[in-house]
Image (spheres, coloured by chain):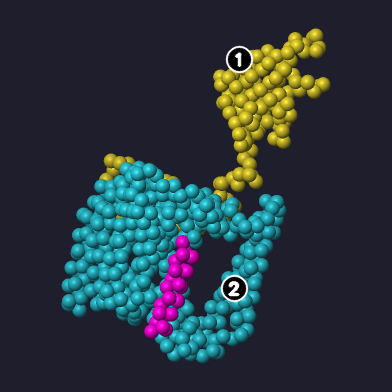
């Protein structure tokens, strides 16, 4: 739009103060939108959400996942760095001894309250062994009870990037 | 006598069917039209076995939802008035329609049935009297709800109605001076002739200022944007019907759209020739029925073919797009269009224009009723179109326009018309 913009202080011309011409000009603008959108329904910017999804950036912070070692056990060493860094206090870890003497600790339980999480990503940054990541790209969090948003270690270990859990 | 009762009931049933049938279509047009004006998609989800009809199924879903919703009555309401208000609003909005002619006459077995329910000789006075009764429902609902927002909405509605009813009545008086009759059938019949041999003698042609004033007042009377201060979502939540739920709310909602249909019908009747088709009077239709009917049927077939082709193109383009019943829709619609076109072809093959004068009369009536319905639908769309174009007035601007602009203009229009009518 490169039309002249009238500020509040500007004086309206007689034609503008008669309103009718301006009303019909406005009606012309809106009907042009209707006709264009009727003829080119496919060009509407609306994303038909469940069928079509916007492509998000790779840096998008979605639902968390826990990484595994090659033998399938969690990479996490229960150092509590993430739960300490967490500003929302939503990570709850109970540590236990790792069977391998070379590794000090392992998580007995690793739980996240997804309703408290603010998706800031500080846990990712705090983690010394790249055990927690938020790169799943899952953003459609829905459940029918609060309890289902309290996710445990098994859930997080099987939360994969393609969104299939 | 029994004939009169029977035909009157049939006419009432026809009007009720058309108005109540238009309401869901208008709700759909409002949602879809506003969406397209704002570059959105609008409703396109609800469907029966994948048939969505571009969102036309949504009103059914709306009605089902409203029917099964809990009917909440807040504490402290005036029970009788609270329950009565939505019924009154809806009833009154339908009542106005009694005097509006939707066609000239229908010839059955040599008898001519006028296509108007009650041909009152004070028709316009009746319209003005009944139309203002609708405010009582709004005031009752707003006051009985025991809520300050609904009360404010009701107060606004009253003041708005008083301010604009005067200009409305005065604008109409100019038209009455020209048509020399209060009877709406006379007003419409008077618009069927040509002015200077080429211009239809419509109310809007001989009373342009009156037409603009009447239409503006009609917007105010129906509480539609830019005059929807009684609803004023931004400041009154939703105004007079805030405390209503379930079917009581639905009645208010439907009343808004029946009001819209009635206002459109009034505008079409008073200022846009009613059932008259410009440059095509009844005598010409009856004489040329043998040309008109084949042309109309051919046009029907052509439109059906075009629609079927468009649907087929869409079906091939969007094959398997959704992966469920919705993929079948374009193909099915193409089939329906083909069937309708074939029906038109069959009608052409039967050569219905050889029926004779009775058939010609029927065709003329059908075309005139069609013209009237077409005009009404156009003005309904106009109401919706304006709503999504203009912003709402501020309260002082509303009063300024009503009292300081429209009232003097309506008076000037009346005086000018009176002088011209007296001189000519």
| Residue at the image position 42 percent from the left and 88 percent from the top | B111
Q: Which residue is mark 2?
A: B302
Q: Quadrant of residue B381?
A: bottom left
In the image shown, does B193 or B29 lie closer to the viewer?
B29
**Res. B59 visible in picture:** yes
B340 versus B136 height, above or below = below
Residue A144 locus on image (x, y percent): 61, 37
Task: Give the Cα separation between the discs numbered 2 and 1.
Answer: 73 Å
Question: Where, quadrant-wise, is the N terminus of chain B in this rendering?
Answer: bottom left
Q: Chain of mark 1?
A: A
Residue at image location 62% in from the left, 36% down from the top: A143
Q: Is residue B2 magenta?
A: yes
- Image colour for chain B is cyan
Disc 2 + disc 1, Cβ < 8 Å: no
Element assignment for label 1: helix
Image disc number at residue A84: 1
The image quadrant of residue B193 is bottom left
Query: Disc number at residue B350?
Result: none
Which of labels 2 and 1 is toward the front?
Answer: 1
Left/right placement of residue B194 relative to residue A44 reads left
Figure colour of chain A: yellow
**Does the segment drawn in magenta span residue B216?**
no
How many labels were placed on the picture?
2
Residue B283 spot, x, y in % from top left: 42, 86
Residue beneath the point at 38% across and 76% down = B116
The part of the image, by quadrant, that contains residue B273 is bottom left
Left or right for B2, reference A121: left
- What chain does badge 2 belong to? B
What segment carries the magenta color? B1-23
């Amino acid at each position: 739009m490169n039309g002249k913009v009238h500020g509040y202080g500007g004086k309206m011309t007689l034609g503008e103060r008669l309103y009718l011409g301006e009303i019909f000009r406005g009606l012309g603008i809106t009907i042009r939108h209707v006709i264009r959108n009727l003829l080119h329904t496919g060009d509407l910017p609306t994303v038909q959400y469940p069928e079509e999804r916007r492509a998000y950036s790779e840096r998008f912070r979605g639902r968390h996942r826990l990484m595994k070692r090659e033998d399938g056990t969690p990479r996490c060493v229960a150092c509590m760095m993430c739960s300490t860094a967490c500003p929302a206090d939503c990570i709850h870890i109970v540590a236990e001894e790792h069977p391998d003497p070379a590794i000090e600790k392992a998580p007995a339980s690793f739980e996240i309250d997804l309703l408290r999480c603010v998706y800031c990503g500080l846990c990712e940054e705090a983690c010394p062994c790249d055990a927690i990541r938020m790169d799943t790209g899952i953003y459609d969090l829905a459940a029918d009870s609060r309890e289902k948003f309290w996710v445990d270690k098994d859930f997080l270990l099987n939360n994969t990037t393609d969104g299939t859990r | 006598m029994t004939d009169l009762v029977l035909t009157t009931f049939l006419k009432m049933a026809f009007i009720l069917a058309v108005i109540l049938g238009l309401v869901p279509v208008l709700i759909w047009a409002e949602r879809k039209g506003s969406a397209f004006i704002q570059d959105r998609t609008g409703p396109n989800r609800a469907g029966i076995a994948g048939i969505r009809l571009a969102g036309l199924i949504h009103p059914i879903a709306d009605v089902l939802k409203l029917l099964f919703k809990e009917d909440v009555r807040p504490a402290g309401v005036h029970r009788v008035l609270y329950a009565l208000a939505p019924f009154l609003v809806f009833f009154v909005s339908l009542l106005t329609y009694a005097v509006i002619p939707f066609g000239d006459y229908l010839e059955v077995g040599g008898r001519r049935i006028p296509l108007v329910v009650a041909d009152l000789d004070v028709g316009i006075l009746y319209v003005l009297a009944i139309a203002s009764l609708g405010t009582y429902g709004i005031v009752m609902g707003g006051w009985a709800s025991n809520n300050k927002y609904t009360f404010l909405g009701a107060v606004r509605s009253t003041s708005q109605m008083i301010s604009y009813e005067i200009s409305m009545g005065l604008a109409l008086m100019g038209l009455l001076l020209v048509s020399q009759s209060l009877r709406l059938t006379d007003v419409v019949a008077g618009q069927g002739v040509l002015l200077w041999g080429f211009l239809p003698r419509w109310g809007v042609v001989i009373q342009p200022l009156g037409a603009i004033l009447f239409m503006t007042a009609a917007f105010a009377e129906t509480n539609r944007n830019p005059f929807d201060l009684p609803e004023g979502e931004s400041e009154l939540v939703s105004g007079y019907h805030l405390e209503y739920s379930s079917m009581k709310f639905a009645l208010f909602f439907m009343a808004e759209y029946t009001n819209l249909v009635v206002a459109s019908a009034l505008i079409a009747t008073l200022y846009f020739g009613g059932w008259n088709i410009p440059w095509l009077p009844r005598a010409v239709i009856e004489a040329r029925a043998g040309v008109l009917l084949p042309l109309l049927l051919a046009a029907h077939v052509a439109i059906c073919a075009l629609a079927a082709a468009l649907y087929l193109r869409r079906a091939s383009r969007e094959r398997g797009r959704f992966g469920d019943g919705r993929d079948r829709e374009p193909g099915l619609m193409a089939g329906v269009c083909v069937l309708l076109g074939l029906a038109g072809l069959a009608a052409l093959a039967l050569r219905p224009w050889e029926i004779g004068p009775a058939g010609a009369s029927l065709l003329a009536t059908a075309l005139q009723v069609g013209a009237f319905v077409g005009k009404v639908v156009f003005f309904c769309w106009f109401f919706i179109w304006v709503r999504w174009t203009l912003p709402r007035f501020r309260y002082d601007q509303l009063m300024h326009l009503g009292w300081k602009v429209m009232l003097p203009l309506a008076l000037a229009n009346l005086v000018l018309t009176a002088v011209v009518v007296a001189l000519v």
